[in-house]
Image (tube, rainbow, N blue to C red):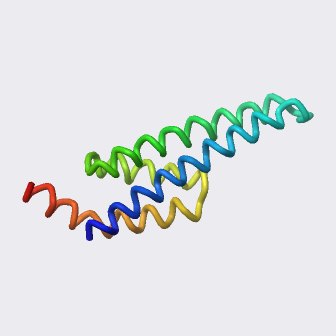
Amino acid sequence: MEKNFKTGAILTIVTGGLGILAGIVLLAILQYAYLWGIVLAGALFELVLGLFTAVAGVFALRGKAWSLALAAAVIGILVFFPTALLAILFLALGRKGLRAVNVAA
């Protein structure tokens, strides 16, 4: 069960990384955009959500804050749906194993 949790944490980090990458790409094409205000808002949205998701994934990988990791995976749906959905699945499956590890430690 601990492997499921670590897999979910890694998928959460990947989702955050993809969000940061999407934000950077949107900022790069900002100079060519016709409606630059909308593109800038989308880029900042992706950057902020991607950064939050990646940081929460790091906390989850350390074995702390399961609820923060799950919340970040749910928010990650707005960033990149496929990896966020898998992260939610693996985090939910790995919760029981995480509790057993934390109680024993």
- Side of 37 relative to 10 (left or right): right
The residue lying toward the viewer, choosing from 53 and 63, is: 63
Residue toward you, 26 or 76: 26
Q: Residue at x 21, y 66 (%)?
A: 97
Query: What residue is rendered at 44% in x and 48% in y?
Result: 72
State the residue at coordinates (48%, 44%).
54
Q: Position of residue 94 (x, y in %)?
A: 29, 66
Quadrant occupied by the C terminus: bottom left
**Residue 34 falls in image quadrant:** top right
13 left or right, relative to 17:
left
Residue 49 occupies which quadrant of the picture?
top right
Asked if residue 76 is positioned above or below residue 51 in the image, the reply reads below
- Residue name at image x 75 percent, y 31 percent: 40
Location of the N terminus by quadrant is bottom left
Q: Is residue 104 above or below residue 37?
A: below
Question: Where does the image place residue 17, in percent across and percent down from the top left?
Answer: 56, 47
For the image shown, how many numbered marks are present on the structure? 0
Q: Nearer the viewer, residue 17 or 86?
A: 17
